Structure formats: C-alpha cells, structure tokens
Amino acid sequence: MTFAKRLPYLVGCIAVATLSACNDIPSQPDTSAAAAPGAPGASPTWAYSGKTGIGTSYEQYHNGQYSDQAATGSVSKVWFSIAQGVVTETMYGLIHEAQLKDMQFVVTGPGFVDLEQTATDSHIEYLHTDSDGRPTSLAYKIVNTDKDGKYKIEKHIVTDPAHNTLLQRVTFSAMADDITAHLVLNPHIGNTGTGDTAHGEGQYWYASEGDTSMVVTTQAEVQGSVGFVGRSDLLSDLADGTRNEFYPSTGTTPGNVSIALTLPTLSNASAQWDFALGFGNSDSAAKEQADASMSRGFAQVLADYHGEGEAIGWQDYLASLDALPELAAGATDGGKLAYASAMVLKAQEDKTHAGALIASLSNPWGDVVPATESSTGYKAVWPRDFYQVAMAFLALGDTATPEVAFRYLKKVQVGPETPGYQGAPGWFLQKTHVDGTLEWFAVQLDQTAMPIMLGWRLWQDGVLSDTEATQWYHDMLRPAADFLADGGDISLGWNTANIQPPFTQQERWEEQEGYSPSTTAAVIAGLVSAAELAELAGEPERAQHYLAKADEYAAQLKPLTFTRAGALAGSDSDSQYFLRINRNQDPDDAGRLMERNGQGALNESEIVDPGFLELVRYGVLPATDSAVRQSLDEVDSSQLPDYLRVKYTFNRDGKAFSGWRRYGGDGYGERTSNGAGYAEGGSNHSDQRGRVWPFLTGERGHYELAYALANNDSAAIAGLKETYAGALEGFANEGLMLPEQVWDGVGDNSTYQYAKGQGTNSATPLAWTHAEYIKLLRSLNDRQVWDHYPAVEARYAE
C-alpha cells in the first residue's frame, strides 16, 4: 500500500504548463466595523441524507471504553458525512451532535455564480485501497468537475485521530480566466441551525453556541466574512454577480449563520489549499485543535488515520477481523463492499459511550427536515438495529465490539432508575440518545427479546464466561425474559398501558400494535435462550416458565397471524398467508389497522410483509413449512397493484435482481405525485410511498439458504451468492454505502430524479443493511444461517 507524498501548504498557485498564474484576493469595501444584518436568517434545515461516504478515526478500547491511554494523542470525537460531492453533517462530541450542516465551494467567474453541490459532476473514491481495490480506511477523494468545463475541484477528506479536527486538502483547477473559489460553511452548532453566532479575522473564522465552538482555518491567503443565511451570506451578496460585503461578525443576535472564505482568483491555473475544521468547548480550544492538526500536516494525519508505522488506524482494525478475508472471497465484487461495510459499522459507534451503536449517521430526508430544534434523526440507539449490527461484528470475527455493546445495553433498559417510569421492569427503550436520554417510549417486544438473544450468543461463542453470563442473566436478561413471559403495567411519558405478550405495542416497523409474526419469532427465540441461561444460573423452575410461555406463543402463532380468508391472491395462492400484523385474535376478519404515514386505516388482510421469514431464521418454523411457502406467493406477486405490491426487480450492469418493500400500503417514503421527500412541508401526505428496502433482499437470501439446505439442493446454494449477495452489492452507491431504501420506479421522480435502484434520501448508510450483507456472506460461507438458534429449532421446527 502506498500513500500520497506530503505536499507543502501553498499560499499562492501551482503553475499549470502554458497557463497563467493566479491573481490576488479581490478588493473589497471596508465594512470591518459592521455586524452582518438580517438576523436570524432563513429557517434552517439539515442536509441531503443519501450519503456517499462517512468517516471518523478508528480508536481502540481500553478496558472496554475509549480512553486517551489507548489513543494516538487523544480520542478524536469527530464524525463527518459526504453527500452530493460535499461535506455534510459533521458531528463533534456525541455522535448525534451535529455542528455543521455542510461545507462546499461557491465558484464565481465572468457571468456565473455556481454552487458546487449542483453545478458539478461528482466522483468519489477511497484514498486507501489494497492491491485488490478494497478500501482500507474511511478517507475519501472527491473530484467535482464543472458541467461546463470551467473548473475542477479535487478534495481529500480525513479526520485527525489525535485531535478533534476535520482536514480537507483541496486542489482547485481553473480552466478559464478570473475564476474565484469561496469556501462556504453553514454551521449548526449544538445540533440546531438557529442559535449560532459567528466572527473571525485573518485565517481564523469561528461559529459558536453555548459551550461549543468551531473554527475553520487555512494557511492560504483568504478574505473571510460571516453573515446570516439568505440575508447577508455570500450567496445573498452575490445576487448581483459581484462580491461587495465583508462582515467580521454576526453580532450578538444568534441565528442561522454562514462563513465564507474567499480564496485567490485563478486564471488557467491550479492551487492547493488545506483547510482545518477544529472543535472545542471554546474558541481558543477549537483553535488549538485546528492548529495542532495543521502543524502535524495533512500527510501525517492521513497516515495515522490509516494506521501507518506505530499509529493504530483503520487498516489495523480490518486486519483484526479474522473472518473478513474469507467473507470477501465469497462476494461477487472482490470484497470491496465487505471491507467498506466492516468500517462503516464500526464508525457508527459513539466514542463517549462505548458500545452505543446507532442506526445511521444521517437524518432521513434531511433537506426538508427543520433544524430549528435538536434532533437525532437516525443517529440514535434502537436495540433492534443494535442487535443486527452486533451480530454482524461477530460474523466478522470482532468479539470485542459486541461484548462492549452488550454491556452498554443496560443503559437503555427500563427499570426503577429510568426517569419518570412506573411499572413492570425489564423491557428496552424504543429509541434513545447514546447517553441513554429517553426519546421514544413505545414497547416493541422484539427489542426486548434481542438483547437476550445477543447475550446467549456471546455466551455460546465463549465471549462471556459462564460466570459472566450468569451475572448478566441476573442483572439484565432475567428482567427482560420476565417481561416477555408475563408482561405487565407500564407508564412512561405518554405511554400508559398493560402489555400482554405476544401482543406488542409496536412491531419492527414501529407503526402498528397487535400480533406480529416477526415480533413473535424474536419473543420465542428470546425466551428459549433465556431458559438456557436460567438453567446455567441454577433457576430450573424459571427456565420451565420461560419455555412454557414460548410453547404457548408458538401454539398461538398461526391462529393469531395466519389468515385463511385473505383478500390477496397470488398466482398459486389459495388466499392463505401470514398477515403483517393482526390487531385482534381473529386473522380472518379483515380488521382495520391504525392510520400511519399519511395512509388511511389499511385492511389487515391486504397487507403482507416478508417479516414472517424471521420465523425460519430463528428456528420457530422449518423453511419447508406450508404456511411460509404459501405466504411467499403474495409477497412475490407481480399481479398486485403498486399500492399493495411488495416485490420489484432491478437491473445493474446487465444483471437482474430483486428487492422488497416493507409491506404493501407503506407510506414511509417519497410522494408519488411530485417525488417530494417524506413529510415535506412538515406534515404527512396521502400519496407518500415507502420504497424497496435492500436489507430485505438479505433476509430473503437467508431464507433461501435455509430452504436449499432443507432440500439438500447444492445447485440452489451455489446460485445464492450471485442472486442475493450480488444484489446487495448492486444496491450500494459509488462510495459503497448501502441505503435504507431505493427508488422502485413508481410515481413522479422530478424532485430527486433517482435512477431505478438508486438509494433515496431516506437514510444512507443504514447500519442494518450493511449488517445484513455481512451476515449473509457469513451464512453463505458457512452454509448455515448465522442468526439461527438451534435450541429453538430443536423444540419447534424439527
């Protein structure tokens, strides 16, 4: 592996053969004493959520925590994302605390003002790859080329593992006369875009709110200015095509602020500049971080980030994953997505609260989501997504991260210490900040079962000793199993209810109450796993209670969730299939579901969801079960109207593959009338449509493996890699990020103009999708389903 040589910081230009040099900074009027007008500025939003890259430094654990004792310098707590060719949400402190909306260039020249994000064609690649082209760090090279050929911007982006700094090396090439680049930042300090102030002088320009500050600096000669977005920022100033106003401060009134650094004008020449974005609890602390990184130099920071020499970096983490080379060898893309997925999953862990695994480093449809109040988006903990990711780490051969993550889960379990809670303990919170701050309060029984399943698996794999497993059984898993077995009264926030499993307040899509096949699968697997842990802990009577309840739920499964009088009919169907969910005890009464995502009260008998395949994955039903086979007919039917249809086909590079929506009637997606983002304008719309979720392709691949194994069909097994792992690779974007949803081709596409099969603006990268891909590779490699519970299968499916 090789590194780019360290390049000197340049104040002026790099001459291009036969081309002229650059000009000076444009002259400007003296407004040095004036504060920028127009507070508080335009109403802020977040950035486009379809990320093509995310990054942060790799840090080692020290006694199960992140500590400066195990770091190069100190633990860096900066994360960044990339979308549409520019740096977007950048976090500092906790992983959900965004401090910047975006940072991009505005380019001006004779007769034009261009916004980099929209005026260029963008290409992204990894700065570090191995001899097979597989990425070995989350450092990126972006090349943005003006659509009219006037300029090109090449950016190298990395964080400093030793400091709270984002570094960006920029080579700007002008292919015409009098081209000026202006670096523009839209701070959102403190995870909002409303309460910021900004000021600066010379090479240092700051934004702050409360006790958090950010500074951008460069060693190039610049003319800086600050303003309020839409009122006195750079784009407002350039409304007449010229740069007229320069403000050193936004004054004392906070708002949605902007920082602009005007760089030397170029004429048929190239220049290289390095920019540091430093963070701290004061202006001076932020400056100290930025200066330290600039002093170390871009090349040294990049080398440390990768893990060259004595430094520990991303290549070291990849080298620690014993199973990764074998899994990569079983991929259809040479292992590129497997290597990227391993790093993406690890990057989405908080570094203050070790083990806190978030769902996605993004805010779904962020460009239409107000940033007026702090919001985590998907940068939060859901125990369900958490479980998927922890199991993927195990599949990779990383045992340290899932163990630390498992121990973290106690922070988000409901009990007497939960603020404001009364009632039966043991269940796990629906959604929390990484520090355990409560956010959403519904009871989702699968999210209470999965920590038990994870604990059992860690014990089985020898990650937890018998003594440790017994301790965690008493401290965390027995209360969870008791809740799954007996339920009880709960009261937290808005939520006061009596929970009687397997009836769940919400299923895995977090929208409906009732009896859910996928939730019931997890509950049964959780109770059977808990029974084995209870036996280990010397509590045989409790173990028998758990098994008795699991038997009861297994016996009720089909009577409660399998309709024999369905409203759908696939090509070979007799209208018998698993419902997505049933709100009462009669699956044949065509009952109404609750209104969600702008959709009216759906008829439960029309709504199918491939989640019943979890019954096979966990071992509750055999892959050959007739109810499972019958239900696949509706899930796969191409005869259903688009409103109810679940399966869609795609094509990439001449290869056809399939994807599935969450369920028919899903409204969690773009509008069909104009393609606008979900809840655009702040409210739901009746024409919203949920799209295809790629991880469901992975779930189907796991089922098809189980079915082929049950039938001893070696030929079918051989074809699964191309059909399902290859499909997930086809859903990845240029930066190898896997999305939550992809465009299925239904409805108007004018707002975002997605290609069919392209990730939408919902959430990319989705940790669950990357986890499902890794687990599928492991399952195909082992010829055994990874998330499988032998004791469950032995009790019910054999």
Image (tube, grey):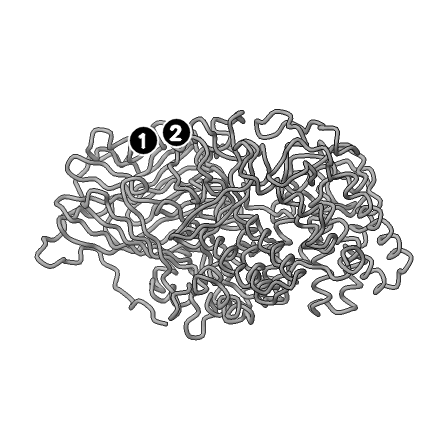
Do we see residue 374 in this rendering? Answer: no
On screen, 688 above or below 53?
A: above
- Which of the 4 image quarters holds residue 239? top left
Determine which residue is flagged by label 1.
232
Q: At x 44% / y 48%, what residue is drawn?
A: 90
On screen, 2 above or below 707?
A: below
Whole-percent x, y for residue 579 in the image: 69, 38
Is residue 71 rendered to the left or right of residue 505? left
Whole-percent x, y for residue 243 in the image: 21, 35
Nearer-N-terminus badge (1/2): 2
- Which of the 4 image quarters holds residue 238? top left
Q: At x 64% / y 64%, what residue is drawn?
A: 712
Whole-percent x, y for residue 199 in the image: 36, 40
Which kind of residue does numbered mark 2 sit on? Answer: Gly
- Asked whether 422 or 29 is in front, the reply is 422
Is residue 525 rendered to the left or right of residue 168? right
Cα–Cα span, label 1 and label 2: 8 Å
SS for callout 1 = loop
Mark 2: give few (<14), some (14-19) or many (20+) Cα within 10 Å. Answer: many
Looking at the rendered image, the quarter that the C terminus falls into is bottom right
- Asked whether 174 or 788 is in front, the reply is 788
Do we see residue 515 in this rendering? Answer: yes
Q: So how many labels did they put on this image?
A: 2
Is residue 435 rendered to the left or right of residue 129? right
Which label is found at residue 695? none
Mark 1: give few (<14), some (14-19) or many (20+) Cα within 10 Å. Answer: many
Is residue 709 rendered to the left or right of residue 45? right
Toward the front, the furthest residue is 572
Which kind of residue does numbered mark 1 sit on? Answer: Ser
SS for callout 2 = loop
Which label is found at residue 41? 2
Q: Kindly check if marks 1 and 2 are in contact, taking CB atoms under 8 A apart as contact.
A: yes
